[in-house]
Image: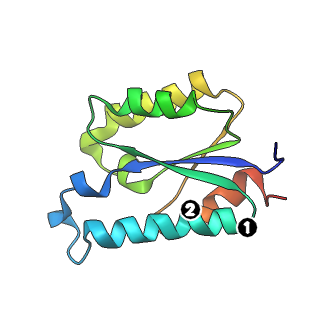
Amino acid sequence: MTDNKTVLMVGWNPEVVDYSRWPGLTAEKVRHALNADRDRLNALGYEAELCFIHDGSSAAGEVAAALDQRAWDCVLIGAGVRKDEAHLVMFEALVNVVHESAPSAKICFNTGPTDSVDAVQRWIGRSR
């Protein structure tokens, strides 16, 4: 067993995003950036995992299932999930799922797929 801080990174599956609103972004670029952020967290001593959601109707269940897998110190909900007003109700549902399923976990938010480390460290500090 490890004492490393656990982090669940919640975001849209890059394959289901409509990139027409973000010229220059592609699923490949977003996936690469998210994987790099996860890998950076792991290199710093956290145990970080990605949890991709696929649509608004299944998102809460997908996150609840991931939260049930282990105890989490921090849950990061990505900017792509929370910044789109069309998904406000889904975002609220995700926050409530985290609150119910992982009540001791800190909740944090990044501003994009490259600053997750800063968001995590604001709330749970540096890992061992």
At a point 41% along the width and 71% down the height, the residue shown is: 32
Give the quadrant of the C terminus.
Answer: bottom right
> What colour scheme governs how the chains and residues are painted in the rendered image of this protein?
rainbow
At a point 56% along the width and 62% down the height, the residue shown is: 38
- Answer left or right for 15 relative to 111: left
Give the quadrant of the N terminus.
Answer: top right
Query: Which label's residue is closer to the chain start, 2 or 1?
Result: 2
Residue occupied by mark 1 = 44
Helix, strand or loop status at disc 2: helix
At a point 52% along the width and 58% down the height, the residue shown is: 110
Q: Looking at the picture, which amino acid does disc 2 mark?
A: Arg
Q: Quadrant of residue 91?
A: top left
Residue occupied by mark 2 = 38
- Count residues near mark 2 (Cα–Cα under 10 Å), then give few for <14, some for 14-19, many for 20+: many
Q: Which residue sits furthest front? A: 1
- Residue 126, above or below 40: above
Residue 85 position within the rendered picture, expressed as x and y whole percent measured from the top left: 28, 45
The one of 21 and 40 positioned closer to us in this rendering: 40
- Residue 78, above or below 45: above
- Residue 64, above or below 32: above
Residue 3 position within the rendered picture, expressed as x and y whole percent measured from the top left: 84, 47
At a point 79% along the width and 61% down the height, the residue shown is: 126
Q: Which residue sits furthest top? A: 100
Which numbered disc covers residue 64? none
Residue 90 position within the rendered picture, expressed as x and y whole percent measured from the top left: 34, 33
